[in-house]
Amino acid sequence: MYLHLGEETVVRGKNIIGIFDIENTSVSKHTKDFLAVSEKNGNVFNVSYEMPKSFIVCSDGKEEKVYISQISASTLKKRSLKS
């Protein structure tokens, strides 16, 4: 299964660690720290330059990537369940 995150970005379903609502989760200091460290390490990728609604954490066993998407977490979850 693959999940379309927006624009031209698709990830393998088995690589997804979590799908998070950016508005609700970015309030936490831990989440802010996680995103800051990921950004510093060059592991954050903007799928679109529209208003971000979610972030998706993926790992292929070697490296971790964080995708920032304009698609809501609930929509991405529904898409992942259909596949």
Image (cartoon, grey):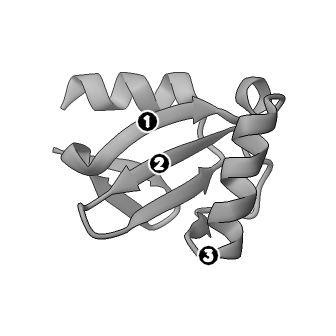
Relative side of 58 to 49, left or right: left
First of labels 2, 1 by sequence position: 1
Q: Residue at x 53, y 57 (%)?
A: 66
Label of residue 57 in the image: 2
Please name which of the two marks, 1 or 3, marks the residue nearer to the observer: 3
Q: Secondary structure at mark 2?
A: strand
The residue wearing badge 1 is 18
Q: Secondary structure at mark 1?
A: strand
Quadrant for residue 71, please give it.
top right
Q: Are marks 2 and 1 in contact (CB under 8 Å)?
A: yes
Query: Where residue 10 appears, x then y in whole percent?
Result: 35, 59
Q: Are marks 1 and 3 in contact (CB under 8 Å)?
A: no
In the image, residue 70 sits, relative to residue 36, either above or below, namely above
First of labels 2, 3 by sequence position: 3
Residue type at mark 2 is Val
In the image, residue 9 sits, relative to residue 15, either above or below, namely below
Nearer to us in this view, 17 or 74: 17
Check the picture and name the quadrant holding the N terminus: top left
Cα distance, mark 2 to mark 3? Answer: 14 Å
Quadrant for residue 40, please give it.
bottom right
Cα distance, mark 1 to mark 3? Answer: 19 Å
Q: Are marks 2 and 3 in contact (CB under 8 Å)?
A: no
In the image, residue 1 sits, relative to residue 58, either above or below, namely above
Residue type at mark 3 is Asn
The residue wearing badge 3 is 41
Quadrant for residue 28, please give it.
top right
Dot 2 surroundings within 10 Å: few (below 14), some, or many (20 or more)? some
Cα distance, mark 2 to mark 1? Answer: 5 Å
Q: Residue at x 70, y 39 (%)?
A: 31
